[in-house]
Image: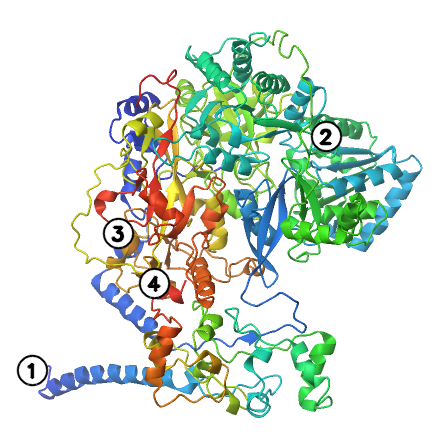
Amino acid sequence: METEKKNGAQLDVDIATLRQAASERTTPRFWRSLDELAATPEFREHAENEFPHGANDITATLDRRELLKVMAASAAFAGLTGCTKLPEQRIVPYVRQPEQIIPGKPLFYATATTLAGVATGILVESHMARPTKVEGNPDHPASLGASDAFAQASVLGLYDPDRSQAEIHDGRIGSWPEFQNELSAALAAEKGSGGAGLRLLTPTITSPTLASQIRAFLKTFPSAKWHQYESVARDNVREGAKLAFGEYVNTVYLVDRAEVILSLDSDFLTSGPGCVRYSRDFSRKRRVESPESKMNRLYAVESTPTNTGAMADHRLKMRATEIESFARALAKELGLAAAAGPAFSSSVPPEWIPAVARDLKQHAGASLVVLGDHQPPIVHALVHSINQALGNFDKTVYITQPIEETPINQWQSIGELTADMRAGKVTTLFILGGNPAYDAPADLTLKELLPKVKFSARLGLYEDETSALCHWHIPQAHSLESWGDAKAYNGAITVSQPLIAPLYGGKSEIDFLAVLTGQAGEPSHDIVREFWKAQQTDVQAFDAHWEKTLRDGVMAGVALFAKQVSLKPGIGADAPAAAQQGLEIIFRPDPTIWDGRFANNGWLQELPKPLTKLTWDSVAMLSPKTAQRLGIKSEDAVELKYQGRTIVAPAWVMPGHADESVTVFLGYGRTRAGRVGTGVGFDAGWIRPYATPWIGTGLEIRKTGAKWALAATQTHNSMEGRDLVRVATLDEYRKNPQFAQVDAEKNPLSLYPEVKYEGYSWGMAIDLNACTGCGACVVACQAENNIAVVGKTEVMIGREMHWIRIDRYFEGDLDDPRTYHEPVVCMHCEDAPCEVVCPVVATVHSAEGLNEMIYNRCVGTRYCSNNCPYKVRRFNYRLYSDWETPSLFGMRNPNVTVRSRGVMEKCSYCVQRINAVKIEAEKQDRTVRDGEIVTACQQSCPSEAIVFGNINDPESAVSKLKKKNLNYSLLEELNTRPRTTYQARLRNPNPEIEKVAI
Amino acid sequence: MAQIFQRSTNTIARLSIYGAVILIALLGFAVDVINKTSYVTEVNNARPQPVPFSHKHHVGELGLDCRYCHTSVEVSSSAGMPPTETCMTCHSQIWTNSAMLEPVRASYSESKPISWLRVNAVPDFVYFNHSIHVAKGVGCTTCHGPIAEMNITWRAQTLYMRWCVDCHKTPENYLRPRSEVFNAFYQAPSDQLALGRQLLKEYKVQKLTNCTTCHR
């Protein structure tokens, strides 16, 4: 644990003072962090220093003589560098050049990325057979061209040098043939009993091919058992469906048809199956073109603050255990026969539930209630019955067959497996993927049972906690290296194809199962293809069908259709359990590294978590009120004791969190993740009991007295508290459509000569009404522009390198603030303050209005960054780019320079993409069409919040946005004339609830 | 107390001051001269290759089109280097026993690529695109020199930034009709400036001198 004191986030002011500060705040209305609110000396120092902990150390001890010496030496070296010859380079062409490959021209292949078995279609950019960048697949229903941060980061996962590279047999290097021999022997021994001691443990399987292989395997070994397990399992969703309909089903939302949405402890916009699609559908219902436009309305009732809650027009914080009472009260209000739940511990405004119920009822058939996966099954059943009562079925929500090939209760499954292991019934165990030794519930003691299995083999991307306890570890092929298939959130069949041969000779799950089913050596491509050929009735047409599937990334004609189900009567009629007393604990997957599978991915570790803006750590999150009661401050190391187990975690005071409740995040505290993820954070799984994996009460929390320094980016690059987000309600906007035009002096005087931009003139518009703060753009930009990872200690001193950051603002009450996201990229100011101060003209303006940054000219004075009012420039204080690890060379975008130490960098509006499109247009003797140039951030954005284009073309999408009266510039008063502008955020509150407009 | 400095010291002092200035100037001049030599620029240095491929023979004498081997020059940033297969289209039929071509045959039969020494190179931070230059009427020999006369290929131009910018500022001095772009024997007409200006308009050639045209 780190006890080092750091700048910025030390919360040394008591919470009562903060609350006072928040309530008294009039201008500016918004605050970014508790430190800013408190205006602590540490925060002032951090904000005022352009380069906190900067490289000012030399000057402190330097006298005139020394300075002259250094200057002379630098001058000499600068002169000498001019004499270097270009190093000798070799050109190595193909012997036989594959068709379609043109050096310098990327190819795009449709494939899939899966999280917990659920597929999202992607297109992968491939440079000379090296996958470098993931883009969304416009033809895929779960993507529609967008993607999430996990998908964006999967290229780094592919090239991760820590991936396992060899078969390991009891700690020594083995080989695949050797493994096959041992495996045959083990299987032969099991044959007699029909596989009574044989167990197969997999994550969630939605792949029809894999499932058919597993079924074939189970046919040969009828007594063998197949278990599925994920630590972030959707068991409660499945069990809730069973309660409601008597069978496991899959629920799909049609968010674009919903006028009123109630989210109960759910983060459906940025997490879980279908979130990319839901986010797009949601934002399309929120576009406001003019004061006459309509908007959907989102209510959120939640315990842990989420992005969905931040998007909500009304947000109510509530303990997770009390969501059931809320659902019951709502059901009752809607006339359902639900018994009332225990009383709420915090005050729920009396008008809330009736008003929400009325609003939902008024929009019957166009309303939607969504529930968080972790809520108990009965609440899921209740929500189904509420949606039914509102007539939403087959309108805004529909039911299909389950997308899992064999849906089961996964926690029950792992319980049975460990029970059998304890009883000594398991002699042969195959673990495909997952990482149960790390993430299985601690009280099942899988870690102790695993080494006792006679023959255990594990297929995994990393030689991790589970591999260490198995006899055999087989390196797994990455999803970008293997053939396969999986279902999307709505059941769409998504075929994945490899972009590259396995870098380390890994085997896919299909390859592994092929050995078990006696198909050893058969190419996985053939297995997948043959499976689908067997499903096709028209064999003649199959080849064309298959080609089209591979091209589109999604299989036509096999979607799951809406299924007719009947709701069981009397759901929730039984009286619920009594109120649960004591401090509540909530377990949640980490927003950026999920259940720990992305722990070794530096991009995802350094991606600031959407609401806390923390990197490289997970926290125990609690509300200001609870923190005040317990005397806990942010960054206090606290001991969490739950059901007999204890763990030490850093505390984080989170405005908007439910009171008397603590959220901990899974996925950290890995012991064998790799050089990036090992030993980072604490393992919340250790105190996660088998019986109550999601929500429970009776947590004990105690200060240890130590501090745990955290790396949060929220206080970096302070904008000095000026109101940079502009917000109004829809009604206010209708009354005053010009509200966003605050103090905008038209055509103010300028010292700079007027420049006329002819031809193209690039600009960007960012819609704050659409941005959910998910972070996909940040990782997309990192992948596209070869942006380096800097590590926790560098982030703590404000040296993160992201070219796009998502600022988070709070407004109002400390205990229940409104939250806003604001992505900030380089503004490409027409009168850019950075340009005039550069002594070597390394940052200049292009004729198309780009603020150009020329690395090979930059000498690193950092004057530009000092003079940038938006704080969007990033400096390479050290050699952050990895110039040594060979596997990472392949990952880089060949069209963007890899920066070295001592160089400034910043958002370039993806100038490499602009140039590529312009060249193609010029060759065809035409101008660039609107929408042809898509920046990386824009491409990845699920909610279409970012639009880029030519502002000289009045018909372009970006020009039209900029003409809207919602459009405003950041720090307009500085007259920098930014090319990046923002569309003000609008809220659509229910007048019955919100009486006083802010 | 006796004088420490003689009168002559003044002269020595002056000499050393002026001398230092002259020395620095000379040094600068020397650096500049060295930088312009073919030792540094590699201009006119024929570079040894694993196969002594002669552009003079293939282009000058046989008249092969540039694009027969450099296939992607019109579509991509890279002009493309021919795979061994391209060599073997002819050399599986002619000169099949030539010792000179042994590395080519070996490459083909062993599926091991030929590793050529790069002749024309720009630094990593320069992004050059062949296709757009060709499309706008910049001929191959404008940059690559008299390729039809090169037995072993050499670099014909420094490829220094000032050389690039010269053309980016005044392309009319170098443009030729699109039909002549791949003509290795092309001679600029005496009225190049008039032709250049006409082509400039016709091909909508822009004088791109923004930094990000090449650096990003």
| Marks 3,2: beta carbons within 8 A | no
Question: What amino acid type is highlighted by mark number 2?
Answer: Pro
| Marks 1,2: beta carbons within 8 A | no
Mark 3, residues whose alpha carbon is within 10 Å: few (<14), some, or many (≥20)?
some
The quadrant holding residue A671 is top right
The residue closer to the viewer here, A461 or A493, is A493
The residue under the point 48% across, 81% down is B179
Distance of label 4 from label 2 (alpha carbons)? 58 Å
Q: Which residue is mark 3?
A: A867
Distance of label 1 from label 2 (alpha carbons)? 107 Å
The residue closer to the viewer here, A716 or A987, is A987
**Disc 3 versus disc 1: nearer the observer:** 3
Q: Which mark is residue B142?
A: none
Work out whether A614 lies above or below B190.
Answer: above
* Chain of the residue on which disc 3 is drawn: A
Distance of label 3 from label 2 (alpha carbons)? 58 Å
Q: Position of residue A556 (x, y in %)?
A: 68, 44
Marks 1 and 2 belong to one chain:
no
Can I make out residue A548 in this image? yes
**Quarter of the rendering occupied by the C terminus of chain A:** top left
Marks 3 and 2 belong to one chain:
yes
Q: Earlier in the sequence, mark 3 or mark 2?
A: 2
**Disc 4 versus disc 1: nearer the observer:** 4
Q: Earlier in the sequence, mark 4 or mark 2?
A: 2
Question: What amino acid type is highlighted by mark number 3?
Answer: Asn
Question: What amino acid type is highlighted by mark number 4?
Answer: Cys
SS class of the residue under badge 3? helix
Distance of label 3 from label 1 (alpha carbons)? 59 Å
Q: Which residue is mark 1?
A: B2
Question: What amino acid type is highlighted by mark number 1?
Answer: Ala
Work out whether A29 lies above or below A584.
Answer: below
The residue under the point 65% across, 50% down is A478
